[in-house]
Image (cartoon, helix red, strand yellow):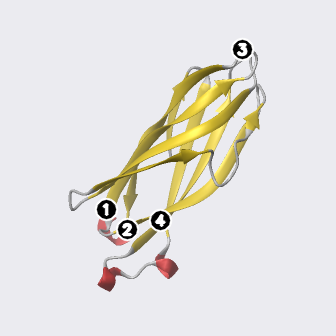
């Protein structure tokens, strides 16, 4: 698990290789990732947008950007957390992702970015 804290918001990421949804012979490697967003600040925040950079070990880079996460723009009260699971496919058995969320501080409508720490996407047999 990797973790980062930006402006009182803690992001933790876990990854799981999805063997049953992958097809290595056709260069299709599927990964799930679980993200927990913990609001350690004194103010309610809302996750408005996300931006991802997805790196394959063949040198390709994809950018994914859009509103919210998994179809929602959650409000996270101080001392609470929000978690979700999503997925990513790669053409190679090793890659990584990183990015940021655009948050809105509810008390004064201030926008700020929260870093999503870079995390590795590695098929388990590559670790042996």
Q: Find residue 31 and name its label.
A: 4
In the rendered view, tell whether residue 75 sits above or below residue 35.
Answer: above
Q: Residues within 10 Å of mark 4 (few under 14, many from 20)?
A: many
Q: Residue at x 57, y 39 (%)?
A: 49
Tell me the SS state at disc 4: strand
Tell me the SS state at disc 1: strand
Q: Find residue 123 and name its label.
A: 2
Q: Is residue 67 left or right of residue 39?
A: left
Q: Is residue 38 left or right of residue 26?
A: right
Q: Separation of disc 4 and disc 3 at Cα?
A: 37 Å
Q: Which residue is at the front of the view, 107 or 84? A: 107
* Sequence-first tag of 3 and 2: 3
Discs 3, 2 touching: Cβ within 8 Å: no
Q: Residues within 10 Å of mark 3 (few under 14, many from 20)?
A: few
In the rendered view, tell whether residue 107 sits above or below residue 122.
Answer: above
In the rendered view, tell whether residue 36 sits above or below residue 84.
Answer: above
Q: Is residue 83 left or right of residue 112?
A: right
Q: Residues within 10 Å of mark 2 (few under 14, many from 20)?
A: some
Is residue 47 visible in the rendered structure shown here? yes
- Quickly name the residue at label 1: 94
Q: Residue at x 58, y 59 (%)?
A: 86
- Quickly name the residue at label 3: 108
Residue 61 point in image, percent of width and height? 29, 53
- Of tags 3 and 2, the one toward the viewer is 3
Q: Which residue is at the front of the view, 102 or 30? A: 102
Discs 4, 3 touching: Cβ within 8 Å: no
Screen quadrant of the C terminus: bottom left
Q: Residue at x 74, y 19 (%)?
A: 43
Residue lying farthest top?
Answer: 108
């Amino acid at each position: 698990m990797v973790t980062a804290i930006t402006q009182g918001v803690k992001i933790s990421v876990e990854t799981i290789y999805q063997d049953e949804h992958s097809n290595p012979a056709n260069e299709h490697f599927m990964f799930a990732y679980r993200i927990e967003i913990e609001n350690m600040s004194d103010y309610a925040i809302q996750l408005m947008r996300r931006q991802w950079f997805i790196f394959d070990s063949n040198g390709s880079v994809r950018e994914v950007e859009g509103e919210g996460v998994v179809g929602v723009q959650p409000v996270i009260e101080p001392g609470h957390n929000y978690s979700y699971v999503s997925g990513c496919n790669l053409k190679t058995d090793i890659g990584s992702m990183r990015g940021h969320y655009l948050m809105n501080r509810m008390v004064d409508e201030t926008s700020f970015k929260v870093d999503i720490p870079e995390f590795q996407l590695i098929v388990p047999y590559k670790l042996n």
